[in-house]
Structure formats: structure tokens, C-alpha cells
Amino acid sequence: MLQQRTLKSLTRAVGVGLHSGQRVEITLRPAQPDTGIVFRRVDLPQPVDIPVSAMAVSDTRLASTLGRDGAKVHTVEHLMSACAGLGIDNLYVDITAEEVPILDGSAASFVFLLQSAGIALQNAPRRFIRVTRPIEVREGQGANEKWARLDPYHGYKLNFEIEFDHPAVDSTGQRVEFDMSVHNYSRDIARARTFGFTKDVEMMRANGLALGGGLDNAIVMDDYKVLNAGGLRYDDEFVKHKILDAMGDLYILGKPLLAAYSAFRSGHALNNKLLRELLSRTDAWETVTFENEKLAPKGFAQPARAW
């Protein structure tokens, strides 16, 4: 049986929110089978649990935000991406503010935290959402066109293409494919950082956003070049970060996907729109388990690999 996974022990981190600039403590704790991933706002007078689900996404401007009963958690996508990459099914995320800490701007710190806590197999079958018919969402036309799509696939792969019309971005890879059966999430995707442009950062800060952002947790560019002294971590770090984000956004579904995701200039909003479209089309997906691990797609049966 392909089993569900949680943590062996709890683990903690302290950081700041990318947009709020607030100090925040996050504690990752084991959870029982079939719990899913649940964010818990422990700073509120009455703690509020916010289980991840496509319908719990309440805002997609600049990040993915989950909400329930008036409580919110912003910028969940990097942690969710790490959980997707390592195959974590059940987890409690205790958080002391309304935004997940940005840490180094990638998912690498969350991968480190999860692997440090240890990954435990549970006596319950891992449930997948298997896409059986193509689903596609589109927005805009011409130069403003963007789209995202899911196709049937025995496994999980993502293909993303970007277009920013910026010299620093244009000189790097614009398109990348990541396949869970072939590649290593921790090595190939997790270290890709979020990025921004100085002109946008100034505008966002004027609006009370990006207050915790800087060169230590983001790739920052002026009109021509990357300003970070160390340069890029990957030759195609920009588009790889878009895959990192997409993996986090799609894992908000609450179960791992068996599908091929492809996208052009997609973002948090369109990714969530794609999930909602999928869920509304009950003829386009089914829930499956694998009693025989040998029948599962390659890359899912093995324990999560380290760096």
C-alpha cells in the first residue's frame, strides 16, 4: 500500500512575513491520517483552524491566502510546495501571525525543516486526485494572454513558460519541465527564490506590502540586472520559482494530483481558478489509491529524497 505521510516530530522556525514585515513563529506538527494540512492561527483569542482546500483560498494578489471564519493566513505557497515535493499528507501548521515567514524566499528552508523532523509513514492509503479529462482556464488576449491546463498523466509533471520582457529575466531560461518521476524536487526546484523589481517594490511598500522583503529573501532587479551579490542559484531560477509556486498552489487542492500541468504566464489566481474548474467538473477526475506500490507512478513510492 502506498501510505500517507506525516512528520516524526515537531519542528519550529522564526522569521518575518514578506509583505507584513511581522515577526512570526511557525511550528510544524505531526497529524493523524486523513487530517490533511491544517493551518492554525494560535495568536488569536480563540485559535482558528484553516484546513487547506481550493475553496478556502480567499485572496490571490501577490500570494495565496487561505481564510476561514474571518481568520487568514497569507503566503502559504512555499510551505505547501515543500509539502508537495516531499509528499507530506498530514500536518498541523501553528502560526503566530497572519503570514507564513518568507525565510530565504524559496522552499528550501521548509524542506530542511520537514526533513529534519523526519517523515513517518502512516497506516492509511495515500489518496490522489487523478485527472481523467483535460481542464483549461484562460484569461486575456494577445500580449496579455495567460493560461493553465491539466491533462491526464500517470504521474505528476509541470511545464511552465514565462514572459517578462526584462533583460535580466530574458537572458535566462524561459521554460522548464519538472517531472516527479525523473527529477529531484529538493535539488531541482526548492532553492528557486521569489523575485521582484525595484520599481514594483517601492510601489508595494507605499501600499503597506513587501515590508519584509529584501536581498536576503528575494531576487531583486532594477531595470537592467539582478542586484543580489551572489547572482542566481539556477540558470533558470525565475521560471523554476514559478513551478515552485504552482506546486504549492495546486497542493492546496488537499490531495496530490496525478496530472500533467502546463501553463503560460499563470499565477496564483489562475492556478486557483484551474483547481475550482477541475472540482466543478466531476467527470474530469477521480480519487485513487494504490494498494500495490508497484502500480503507483515512479517517484511516489520512495521516501522523500534528501538534497
Image (tube, rainbow, N blue to C red):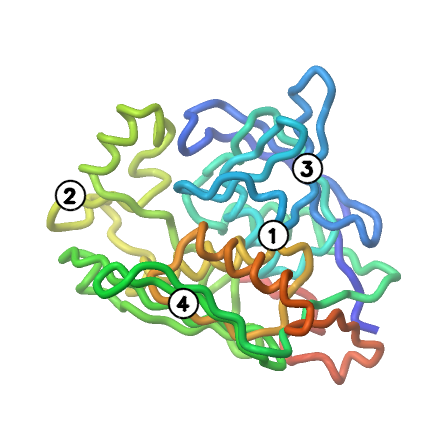
Q: Residue at x 58, y 28 (%)?
A: 25
Q: Are marks 3 and 4 in contact (CB under 8 Å)?
A: no
Residue marked by disc 2: 222
What's the distance in space between the residues labelled 3 and 4, CA to CA? 28 Å
Q: Which residue is mark 4?
A: 263
What is the secondary structure assignment of the residue under circle 2?
A: loop
Q: Nearer the viewer, residue 230 or 45?
A: 45
Callout 4 amino acid: Ala
- Asked if 107 appears above or below 237 in the picture, the reply is above
Residue at 64% in and 80% down: 298
Ranked by sequence position, the earlier of labels 1 and 4 is: 1
The x and y percentages for residue 158 are 48, 70
Estimate the spatial distance between the alpha carbons at disc 4 and disc 2, rounded to whole Å.
Answer: 26 Å
The answer to whether mark 1 and mark 2 are in CB contact below 8 A is: no
Q: Residue at x 58, y 57 (%)?
A: 276
Q: Secondary structure at mark 3?
A: strand
Between 305 and 196, the one lying in front of the other is 196
- From the top left corner, tell me how far across and down residue 33 is, in percent: 83, 53
Which residue is depicted at the point 61% across and 33% down? 26
**Location of residue 62 by image quarter:** top left
Which numbered dot is residue 122?
A: none
Name the residue beneath numbered marker 1.
252
Q: Decide: marks 2, 3 in contact (CB < 8 A)?
A: no
Work out how far the residue at label 3 is from the one at label 1, CA to CA, in angstroms.
11 Å
| Secondary element type, mark 1 | loop
- The mark found on residue 50 in the picture is 3
Q: Nearer the viewer, mark 2 or mark 3?
A: 3
Q: Earlier in the sequence, mark 1 or mark 2?
A: 2
Q: Mark 4–mark 2 contact, CB under 8 Å? A: no
